[in-house]
Image (cartoon, rainbow, N blue to C red):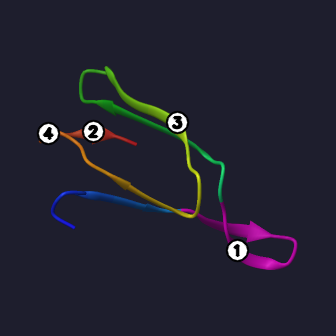
Amino acid sequence: MNKYPLVLEFVGSTDTGNDYLADGPVHISDSHGKDLLSTRSDGPFMLVSLPQGRQNV
């Protein structure tokens, strides 16, 4: 997983309990506010390759 230093897992409370979620918005910017990624998740997991540094998710 060294190629993907960020792993996101989407889980939330639903009417039936806790479930995996998909189609959620994902916004990642660098420490200066520049957008690095703006998308929607296709499934409950997302692997992201980012440049070194600090990011806001």
- Residue 51 rendering spot, x and y as whole percentages: 16, 39
Tell me the CA gap for discs 4 and 3. Answer: 20 Å
Residue picked out by circle 4: 53
The number of discs equals 4
Q: Residue at image x 59%, y 59%? A: 43
Q: Which amino acid does label 2 sit on?
A: Gln
Residue stretch in magenta? 10-21
**Above/below status of 48 relative to 28:** below
* Tags 3 and 2 touching, CB below 8 Å: no
Query: Residue 55, labelled with which disc?
Result: 2
Residue 17 is situated, as x and y percent measured from the top left of the image, at 78, 79
Q: In the figure, 30 relative to 3: above or below?
A: above
Coordinates of residue 18 in the picture (x, y in percent): 71, 77
Vertical placement of residue 17 versus 7, above or below: below
Q: Is mark 3 on a helix, strand or loop?
A: strand
How far apart marks 3 and 2 lie (CA) works out to 16 Å
Q: In which quarter of the image is the N terminus?
A: bottom left
Q: Rate crowding at label 3 as few (under 14), some (14 to 19) or many (20 or more) other CA atoms within 10 Å.
A: few
Which amino acid type is marked by label 3? Answer: Thr
Left/right placement of residue 9 relative to residue 18 reads left
Report if the CB atoms under discs 4 and 2 are less than 8 Å apart: yes
> Along the polypeptide, which appears first: circle 1 or circle 4?
1
In the image, taking residue 18 as reference, residue 24 lies left or right, namely: left
Locate residue 17 relative to residue 1 in the image: left or right.
right
Q: Which amino acid type corresponds to the residue marked 1 in the rendered image? A: Asp
Instruction: Indicate the quadrant where residue 3 lies.
Output: bottom left
Q: Name the residue under label 3.
A: 39
The mark lying in front, picked from 1 and 2, is 1
Residue annotated with mark 1:
19
Q: In the image, which is nearer the foreground, mark 3 or mark 2?
A: 3
How far, Cα to Cα, is label 1 from label 3? 21 Å
